[in-house]
Image: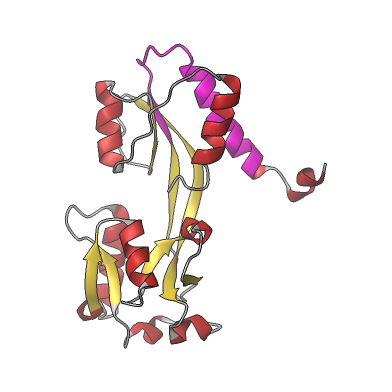
């Protein structure tokens, strides 16, 4: 989910602290929260959670979920897609173990519209889902940031009746003794301010 912000974030840190050494790890939101609480990592990009305990969090962005379809799919040629258009499609869903908010939303939506029987594959991360869609094995709902994938072999389409967005932000432990922590958090905040500037500001 950080594909749109992580390169700019790391670049700004490297310019301000040219001698800094950083280790980048990936994991689920739950994994990152546990590592922040135990002091194994200093800062994490996570999805919003209801109870973050002693950690601090600020929101950076939100992503809309759209339907990912292979470029050769008939759905890619439609100007407008409704849920009824999915009835003859093989669906790729996220894993139903330890349901997250995202997984729960789509599991309930598929059940409501009697699409559960169409689920042909399930996977536990966005990259796997997009790989299956790109291979022509089915369709699946994916966050809008996937449009930035290089050489992508899929299209993203809005589906009538599906309105789901999920946020992403930065979390940290207030007890973390890292000297430059506050400066690094300010760098993350500056990326949010830049994203929210009006388009006219970009022409200066």
Q: Residue furthest left?
A: 97
Specify the quadrant that holds the C terminus.
Answer: top right
Seen in the picture, residue 12 relative to 133 is either above or below; the reply is above
Residue 188 at x, y = what percent? 53, 31
* Image location (x, y in percent) of residue 42: 37, 23
Relative height, residue 35 to residue 88 (above, below): above
* 189 drawn magenta: yes
Assess whether residue 112 is covered by the magenta stretch.
Answer: no
Image position, residue 1 (x, y; %): 42, 48
Q: Is residue 81 visible?
A: no
Q: Is residue 114 visible?
A: yes
The residue depicted at 48 percent of the width and 60 percent of the height is: 144
Point 69% across, 43% down: residue: 197
Which one is nearer the viewer's eye here, 164 or 173?
A: 173
Q: Residue at x 38, y 86 (%)?
A: 84
- In the image, 54 versus 37, the foreground residue is 37
Q: Residue 195: horizontal and vertical position, in percent?
A: 63, 43
Total of numbered circles in the picture? 0
Q: Which residues are magenta?
A: 170-195
């Amino acid at each position: 989910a950080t594909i749109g912000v992580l390169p700019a974030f790391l670049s700004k840190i490297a310019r301000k602290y040219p001698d800094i050494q950083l280790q980048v790890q990936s994991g689920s939101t739950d994994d990152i929260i546990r590592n922040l609480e135990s002091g194994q990592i200093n800062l994490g990009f996570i999805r919003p959670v209801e109870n973050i305990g002693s950690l601090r969090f600020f929101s950076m962005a939100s992503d809309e979920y759209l339907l990912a379809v292979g470029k050769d799919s008939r759905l890619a040629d439609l100007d407008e897609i409704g849920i009824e258009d999915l009835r003859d499609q093989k669906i790729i869903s996220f894993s139903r173990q330890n349901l997250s908010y995202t997984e729960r939303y789509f599991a309930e939506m598929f059940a409501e519209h009697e699409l559960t029987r169409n689920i042909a594959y399930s996977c536990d991360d966005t990259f796997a889902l997009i790989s299956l869609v790109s291979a022509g094995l089915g369709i699946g709902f994916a966050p809008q940031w996937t449009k930035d994938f290089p050489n992508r072999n899929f299209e993203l389409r809005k589906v009538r009746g599906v309105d789901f967005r999920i946020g992403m932000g930065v979390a940290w432990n207030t007890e973390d003794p890292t000297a430059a922590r506050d400066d690094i958090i300010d760098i993350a905040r500056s990326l949010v301010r830049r994203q929210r500037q009006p388009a006219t500001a970009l022409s200066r």
